Structures are given as C-alpha cells and as structure tokens.
C-alpha cells in the first residue's frame, strides 16, 4: 500500500506549483511531463492518486486515461482531472467513469490539499481491495 | 422558347402553328393526349396550348396528369375550347391552366395570349433561378458560419487554457508566501498583488463564462424544478453574508412555482442578483423577493433598499464591462455579472430589467421565465 501522488502535466509551472504545495504539506509526489511518461510510470508499478491535465500535446488527458484503461493499469489508481478549458468533455463517455473529481485551474493551495485529503485515504482502500 | 400545341384536329394544328410562326417560337405539335405527355417529358416546352375536346384523353385529364407531376407542373397551359362554355373555362382555370382561347381564334388574340403567358413563364423561371441561387448562397454561408463558430469555440477553449494555466501558480503560491512573511511593509505589497491576482482570476472566469453563454452551441441542462425551493436554497447559501451586513430578507414566495430550467444557471443568476443587492446597500438594509405567475410566464422581482440608480445607469447596467462611476475601481467587481445574468435569462427565453426611483431609492430587478 502506498500514499503516492502523481501530477501529469506538460506545463513546468504547474508541475512545480503542485510539488511546492504538496512538499510543504508532507505529501511525496511524482511528476510525469506527458501522458506517455505517466503510462511508463504505471507500467513500472506506480499506483496512487493521479492529477491529470486535460490539454496536453500529443496525448491529451482523455487519451492517456483511455490508454491506461486499455493496458489494464487503471486498478489501484484514482484520477482527478486538472481542467483549464471551458468544455473539457472526453472523447468517449465511458472514460468519464474513471474520473473521480475535477479541479479547475487556477486552483488555490487549499483546493488542491482538500482534494488530496479527501481522496488519498480512498486510494489506500482501493489498493487494499485488490 | 418552345410552345407545344395539342389538338386531334390536324387542320386546327396547322393553323395554330402557322399563326404562331411569326412569333419566332419553336412550335411543336401533338395530336393526342398520349402524344402530348410523351413530348412534354422529352422536350419540356415553355407553354402548352391544349385542346379540351379530344377522343381517348380529354384536355382536362392531360392537365391533371401534368399538374400532379412535380417536374412538369410549372409549365403553363392555355386551354383551347371549341365553345364559349363558361363551366369548361372555370374548370380549366381551376385545374391550373393560366388562360383559355376560344376557337375559332382570332390570330392577334392568340398571339397576344401566348406572349403574355410566355412572359409570365419567363419571369417565373428567373424567380426560380434566383431562388435556387439564394438557397445555394444561404447554404454556403451557413457552412462558413459554422466553420467560424467552430473556430471561435476552439479559440475560446485555447484562450481559457492559456489564461487559467499561468494564473494557477499565482493564485496557489502567493498566499503561501504571505503566510511566511513577518515584515508588515512587504505583507502590504504582497496583499496588493494577491488582491489583483484575485481580480484577474474573477475577470478571466467571468469573461470565459460569458463567451460560453454567448456560444450558440451551449446546451442548457433543462429539468423540471420548483423555483421556490431553488430560491430558498440560494438564500440559505448567502445567509452568512446577510448576517454579516445586517440585511433583512423578506421572501414572499410561498407557493410552489413549477418551471423547466437549467437549475445551476438560474441559481447562479439569483445568487448574482442578491449578492449585488447586498453589495450596493448601506448596512441594515432589506431585500424583498416576490413571485408572480400567469398562464405564460413567471416573474421574480428582487427589491432592495440600496443606493439605487440614476436613469442613465439603468440604461447600461446589463452591458458588458459596464461599471457605475462609483464602482469603477472596485476590484471585487468584474463588470460582467449582470451581462451574464442577462444571457442566462435570454437562453431560457425570458427577459430581465431593472427599475429604480433614483439615487438612494433602492432598486428592483425583475426577471421572467416562460412556462
């Protein structure tokens, strides 16, 4: 069981912002700079709470989730979307079910921390069940 | 232009043909109803001179067949009648003929009637052609407009992303820095920066929301609800602000109001209007909410005892980025709240308007929702 958190975002400022906030509050965090890197880390055994950006080049957040599901890497993870677009609809309706929460940019440190506090215990529960 | 003469009497055919010869027309002949239909399908004439009294198939029958065929119904028909029989003429015109000529025909009259019918046909053809061109152009423009709308939506999404992303570190991190600072002078400077970041965040959110509401693609999530409950809900969510400012609320809506609305948007509208009232009110004021319903729509009125408005202000408050002079530098206001309210109501097919007796006389905002 782990209390891992991953941020998947192509924007270095967002990666850094999330890292600063979570570091300051004692939460370890891994950074994936693209959907591809996220999938590689999941293949390597990472399980935990994923903060997934929607608009990323090459593979957007929805494509990444579809790939995660296809490779059977979804189990043991909880996904929160980081959205900055007005209409962040996924390409496939079934992908919505994989997402537990949406955090809209710009978020405050409190909003981010609240999401972590709310869903991180649930990650352990999900992992305990598998 | 092509004229088809149909008559079972060979002699009459020849005479008619000869008389029209002067008109520089392409004259075709058919000696029976069956012949006529065949030739019409093959050559599509601009005018048919049709004898009424023919064996096998009468002129009326031929006319009925032609008028029931979409491709041929626009060809004008002039009946040729042997007798001056009013009933036949009326029947012929009722069947769709444009005119009739009584045999034996006067050569001048025949030519004049043919010319008149052909002129009408020509104008009709031109009109049809213009209509087709117009339809083509409308279709083409519609494609162009849809492309532009798609581009606009894509632009707004990209803009939304590009504005919100760089605001994130500012919104999230500056307050963290503020907590760590002891120096009151630096605290003051940072406070100013944070306030303005908050303003920019609000302005960005509101601008993008307005753009989304202005998009023709926006689909409202309509559901049947009791508007009375939604208003009570909204009032509850604002209760701490009411007690903070000592605002007294009188809600006169006592009976259920069943409407079909986008609940989230209408609650936001009510929230905006009531917080506006609180904002522009001296402490210890009051807000009264009334509901009126008739067979067509429901009207909600929100009346406050606040600072009121001048006639000029009333004319502009629903305009985008309008701020009354005394609120021009108000960093808590985006100048878009009421524009958003207006768009929300318009999307529901209703209307919104404000009334005030003048400065310090309070304001009433009314909005309607169709039933």
Image (cartoon, rainbow, N blue to C red):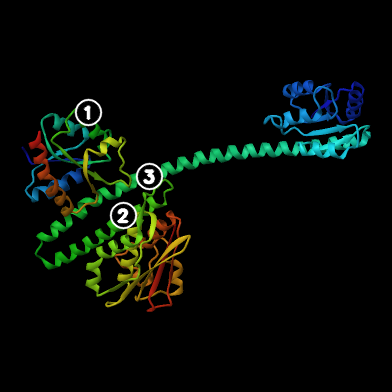
Q: Residues within 10 Å of mark 3 (few under 14, many from 20)?
A: few
Residue B365 point in image, percent of width and height: 40, 68
In the picture, residue A128 is in which quadrant? top left
Q: Residue B171 or B34: which is nearer the viewer?
A: B34
The N terminus of chain B sits in image quarter: top right
Residue B323 point in image, percent of width and height: 38, 67
Q: Secondary structure at mark 3?
A: helix
| Label 1 chain ID | A
Which residue, given by chain and number where applicable, does mark 2 sit on? B205
Q: Is residue B114 visible?
A: yes
Which residue, given by chain and number where applicable, does mark 1 sit on? A70
| Label 3 chain ID | B
The C terminus of chain B sits in image quarter: bottom left
Q: Residue A108 or B355: which is nearer the viewer?
A: B355
The image shows residue B99, relative to residue B370, as above or below, that is above
In the picture, residue B192 is in which quadrant? bottom left
The label nearer to you, 3 versus 2, is 2
Check if mark 2's residue and mark 1's residue have beta carbons within 8 Å. no
Q: Is residue A4 visible?
A: no
The image shows residue B350, relative to residue B153, as above or below, that is below
Total residue callouts:
3
Which residue, given by chain and number where applicable, does mark 3 sit on? B155
Residue B67, disc: none
Mark 2 and mark 1: Cα distance apart in space: 35 Å
Mark 3 and mark 2: Cα distance apart in space: 15 Å
């Amino acid at each position: 069981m782990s209390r891992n958190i991953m941020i998947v975002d192509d924007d270095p400022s967002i990666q850094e912002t999330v890292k600063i906030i979570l570091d300051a509050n004692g939460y370890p965090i891994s950074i994936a700079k693209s959907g591809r890197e996220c999938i590689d880390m999941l293949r390597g055994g990472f399980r935990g709470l994923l903060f997934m950006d929607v608009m990323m080049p090459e593979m957007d957040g929805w494509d990444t989730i579809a790939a995660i599901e296809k490779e059977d890497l979804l189990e043991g993870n909880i996904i929160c979307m980081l959205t900055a677009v007005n209409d962040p609809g996924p390409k496939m309706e079934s992908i919505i079910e994989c997402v537990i929460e949406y955090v809209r940019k710009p978020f405050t440190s409190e909003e981010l921390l609240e999401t972590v506090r709310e869903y991180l215990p649930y990650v352990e529960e999900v992992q305990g069940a598998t | 232009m092509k004229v088809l003469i149909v008559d079972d009497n060979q002699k009459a055919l020849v005479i008619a043909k000869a008389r029209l010869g002067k008109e520089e027309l392409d004259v075709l002949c058919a000696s029976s109803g069956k012949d006529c239909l065949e030739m019409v399908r093959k050559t599509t004439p601009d005018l048919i001179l049709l004898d009424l009294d023919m064996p096998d198939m009468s002129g009326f029958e031929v006319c009925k067949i032609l008028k029931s065929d979409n491709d041929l119904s626009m060809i004008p028909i002039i009946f040729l009648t042997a007798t001056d029989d009013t009933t036949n003429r009326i029947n012929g015109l009722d069947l769709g003929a444009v005119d009739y000529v009584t045999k034996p025909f006067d050569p001048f009259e025949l030519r004049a009637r043919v010319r008149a019918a052909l002129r009408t046909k020509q104008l009709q053809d031109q009109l049809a052609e213009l209509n087709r061109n117009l339809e083509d152009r409308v279709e083409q423009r519609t494609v162009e407009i849809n492309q532009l709308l798609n581009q606009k939506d894509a632009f707004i999404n990209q803009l939304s992303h590009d504005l919100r992303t760089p605001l994130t570190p500012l919104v999230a991190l500056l307050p963290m820095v503020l907590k760590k600072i002891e120096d009151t002078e630096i605290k003051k400077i940072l406070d100013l920066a944070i306030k303005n970041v908050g303003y920019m965040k609000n302005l960005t959110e509101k601008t993008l929301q307005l753009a989304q509401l202005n998009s023709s693609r926006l689909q409202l999530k309509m559901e049947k609800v009791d508007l009375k409950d939604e208003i009570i809900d909204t009032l509850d969510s604002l209760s701490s602000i009411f007690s903070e400012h000592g605002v007294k609320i009188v809600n006169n809506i006592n009976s259920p109001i069943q409407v079909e609305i986008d609940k989230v948007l209408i609650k936001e509208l009510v929230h905006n209007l009531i917080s506006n009232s609180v904002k522009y009110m001296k402490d210890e004021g009051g807000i009264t909410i009334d509901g009126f319903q008739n067979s067509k729509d429901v009207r909600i009125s929100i009346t406050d005892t606040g600072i009121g408005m001048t006639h000029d202000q009333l004319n502009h408050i629903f305009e985008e980025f309008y701020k009354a002079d005394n609120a021009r530098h108000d960093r808590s206001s985006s100048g878009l709240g009421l524009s958003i309210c207006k768009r929300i109501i318009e999307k529901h097919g209703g209307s919104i308007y404000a009334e005030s007796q003048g400065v310090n006389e309070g304001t009433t905002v009314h909005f309607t929702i169709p039933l």
